[in-house]
Amino acid sequence: MTTGSRPRQFLSEINVIPLVDVVLVLLVIFMVTAPMLHRGLDINLPTTSSNNIQAEERLIVTIQRDHTLSLGNDTISLVNLRAKLQEAKILNPLISVYLRADQTVPYGTVVQVMDEVKGAKIERLGMITGPKIETIIEDDTIGISR
């Protein structure tokens, strides 16, 4: 050894910064791909020669904001609604009607359409609604959330 050189020291610490980088990249990859992996159960259903379950026919009556009425995709008047529904009832006695109305439409208009559906002797009437969005109202004076 020379007199001006120090003895060599070995680095005994592990550099974890590259390890943290790799782990974070893997975490992001798993977070992105995990929702895409969600699927239902894969099963093979047995087959039969007769199928007792029939698809239910549904009609959707829509009342728009401007009070226009639609039966399916066709615009229709309130006067002609009962006749169209009676024709559909003759073709399928178990037909269902779903009513979809804008929330700004007056209640009286909705009741008139429901009356036309019942006048066509259709017993299966449902209402289509959207999902409820919960809001929290903060009361600043008391500090209570309702």
Image (cartoon, rainbow, N blue to C red):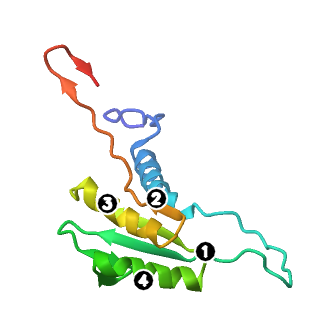
* Separation (CA) of disc 4 from disc 1: 18 Å
Which residue matches tag 3?
110
> Residue type at mark 4?
Lys
Classify 10 Å Cα crowding around label 1: few (below 14), some (14-19), many (20 and above): few
- N-terminal label among 3 and 4: 4
> Residue type at mark 3?
Val
Numbered disc in front, either 4 or 1: 4
| Residue 64: mark in rendering | none
Provide residue 64's location: percent of width, then percent of height.
Answer: 24, 69
The residue lying at 57 percent from left, 63 percent from top is: 37
- N-terminal label among 1 and 3: 1
Left or right: residue 81 compared with residue 126: left
* Separation (CA) of disc 2 from disc 4: 54 Å
* Separation (CA) of disc 3 from disc 4: 18 Å
Which residue matches tag 4?
84
> Residue type at mark 1?
Glu
User: Furthest-front residue in view?
Assistant: 119
The answer to whether the residues at label 3 and label 4 have Cβ atoms under 8 Å apart is no
Which residue matches tag 1?
56
> Residue type at mark 2?
Ile
* Separation (CA) of disc 2 from disc 3: 50 Å
Seen in the picture, residue 71 relative to 27 is either above or below; the reply is: below
Classify 10 Å Cα crowding around label 4: few (below 14), some (14-19), many (20 and above): some
Numbered disc in front, either 2 or 3: 3
Q: Quadrant of the N terminus?
A: top left
- N-terminal label among 4 and 1: 1
Element at badge 4?
helix
Provide residue 15's location: percent of width, then percent of height.
Answer: 43, 41
The residue lying at 33 percent from left, 58 percent from top is: 111
